[in-house]
């Protein structure tokens, strides 16, 4: 599964929430997390800018414990493929999920990723954390 930066931030902010539970599944070997360096840098940058050291420390611990499989950075051409689905700053998320061969993309970004357009036009299922757990349990 490919986890968007929004979920990494949410896990650092709320260690009992859905995103943190996804990281727990990864820590226990029940699923494989995929990410690009850009996703992780975005999460780290947002935490450092908007929150305190405790949240940033939790993110770093989560990252170390989760055993993330790193996807090669996407190219401009790979991002451009998703031009009609989302804004330029978030195309790397879609491109990373495809490049990594993700079976699902989980995000909390209602404005740019969890949209009807992306859900209908993207070949990988796109879910929020609640939808992911319903999908996972099936």
Image (cartoon, rainbow, N blue to C red):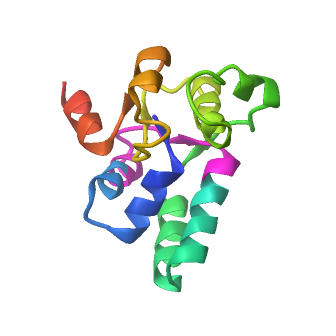
Which picture quadrant has residue 20? bottom left
- The residue lying at 64 percent from left, 29 percent from top is 95
Query: Would residue 5 appear left or right of 81 to someone viewing this image?
Result: left
Say left or right for 60 vs 117. Answer: right
Q: Position of residue 73 (x, y in %)?
A: 75, 38
Q: Nearer the viewer, residue 27 or 15?
A: 15
- Taking the image as shown, residue 58 lies to the left or right of residue 82, namely left
Count of marks, rendered view = 0
Whether residue 66 is visible? no
Residue 81 visible, this orientation: yes
x and y, in percent, of residue 122 in the image: 50, 19
Residue at figure coordinates x 55%, y 47% from the top left: 68
Give the percent coordinates (x, y) of residue 110: 40, 43
Q: Is residue 74 above or below residue 82?
A: below
Closer to us: 22 or 6: 6
Question: Taking 40 as reference, is 127 above or below it?
Answer: above
Magenta stretch holds residue 38? yes
The percent coordinates of residue 38 (x first, y second) are: 69, 49
Residue extent of the magenta highlight = 23-39
Task: Please determine whether, in this image, residue 81 is positioned above or below residue 7.
Answer: above
> Residue 45 occupies which quadrant of the picture?
bottom right
Q: Residue furthest right?
A: 76
Does the magenta run of residues contain 76?
A: no
The furthest residue to the bottom: 53
Which quadrant of the rendered structure holds the N terminus? top left
């Amino acid at each position: 599964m490919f986890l968007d930066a929004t979920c990494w931030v949410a896990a650092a902010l709320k260690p009992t929430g859905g995103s943190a539970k996804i990281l727990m599944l990864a820590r226990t070997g029940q699923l494989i997390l995929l990410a690009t360096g850009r996703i992780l840098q975005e999460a780290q940058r947002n935490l450092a800018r908007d929150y305190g050291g405790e949240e940033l420390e939790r993110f770093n611990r989560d990252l170390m414990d989760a055993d993330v499989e790193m996807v090669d950075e996407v190219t401009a051409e790979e991002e451009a493929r998703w031009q009609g689905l989302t804004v330029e700053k978030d195309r790397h998320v879609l491109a990373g999920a495809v490049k990594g061969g993700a079976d699902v993309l989980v995000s909390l970004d209602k404005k740019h990723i969890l949209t009807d357009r992306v859900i209908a036009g993207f070949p990988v299922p796109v879910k929020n954390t609640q939808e992911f757990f319903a999908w996972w349990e099936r």
